[in-house]
Image (cartoon, coloured by chain):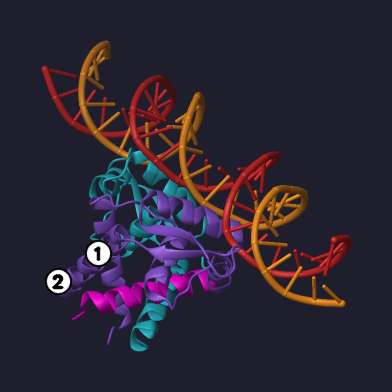
Chain colours: A purple, B cyan, C orange, D red
Amino acid sequence: MELNHIHAMNLWHRVMVATLERDLPDLTARQFALLFHVYLGPPPHTVRGLAARLKISKPAVTRALDRLSALGFVKRMRDKGDRRSVIISRTVAGAVFLRDFADMAADLAETV
Amino acid sequence: MELNHIHAMNLWHRVMVATLERDLPDLTARQFALLFHVYLGPPPHTVRGLAARLKISKPAVTRALDRLSALGFVKRMRDKGDRRSVIISRTVAGAVFLRDFADMAADLAETV
DNA sequence: CGTTATCGTTCCGGTTGCGCAACGAATCTT
DNA sequence: AAGATTCGTTGCGCAACCGGAACGATAACG
């Protein structure tokens, strides 16, 4: 996978503009990173784990999850083994959103 | 330039996480799109032009410019021809920031 | 000229996010 | 069993952002 910095800038530009134009749910950098990490990082995902991995506070994770689960992109489940922990898992809506987003990026990459 | 949706997801994931980890100035999607557009879109850039192009309100553009110019990434200048208009132009700091960001993305693309 | 239109900004009320500290619940330690 | 620890959440005060409307300044029009 090759991508020089010129191409990277052009790609990011196009995707950002397209995101606004289609007014997709405007997520924070944190919410975005969290969403991607839940779908692409190694499970299981817990609040403390995500906070540590992404270097953000636990309350920030909780609130990002509030937003993402309100959008239906993510789901909370109590850990059976340790009922203090919460396992964050994927949803169909979240998978569809990420898929669409990635397809958009891939399409825009071709037009560079 | 090729990029399938799997690669696109992985790339976005990595860049988002890296952005948080290095705690770069956390810009809104709008601020980001605006910054890219000023540097990569065809000048001249005016508030109304950016608002129309990015489908956001004029006050939103004004405030995004406040933030970006506070960071030194962008500069406002009165249009000599029509003194009602404001021309948004680039700065060295903004070019450096974008360059670094693009380099980061390019580096992360190689590790996919 | 005076009137009308356009430009970017500011005001307004409301929403959302933040970090820190404290919290109840669950688990671990001894 | 009792105290200490760890889990995620919530309360608090604060800062940033939002859209719509109104504003002063400038330009275009009749």
Disc 2 marks a residue whose amino acid type is: Thr
> What residue is rendered at 34% in x and 77% in y?
B11
Where is the N terminus of chain A found, in terms of image quarters?
bottom left
Q: Is residue A34 left or right of residue C21?
A: left
Residue D21 falls in which quadrant of the image? top left
Q: Is residue A57 visible?
A: no
Residue A64, percent from left and from top? 48, 56
Tag 2 residue:
A111
Residue B86 colored in magenta in the image: no
N-terminal label among 2 and 1: 1
Q: Is residue A5 visible?
A: yes
Q: Is residue A48 above or below residue B28?
A: below
Residue C25, percent from left and from top? 66, 54
Q: Is residue B42 left or right of residue B103?
A: left
Q: Is residue B14 above or below residue A26?
A: below
Tag 1's secondary structure? helix
Residue A51, percent from left and from top? 57, 67
Where is the C terminus of chain A found, in terms of image quarters?
bottom left
Give the CA separation, mark 2 to mark 1. 10 Å
Looking at the rendering, the stretch of residues picked out in magenta corresponds to: B1-22
**Residue in front for this viewpoint, A14 or D9:** D9
Q: Is residue A88 left or right of residue B8?
A: right
Tag 1 residue:
A14
Residue B16 colored in magenta in the image: yes
Q: Residues within 10 Å of mark 1 (few under 14, many from 20)?
A: many
Residue A28 falls in which quadrant of the image? bottom left
Q: Are marks 2 and 1 in contact (CB under 8 Å)?
A: yes
Chain ID at mark 1: A
> What residue is rendered at 37% in x and 78% in y?
B105
Residue B76, percent from left and from top? 41, 51
Tag 2's secondary structure? loop
Residue A84 falls in which quadrant of the image? bottom right
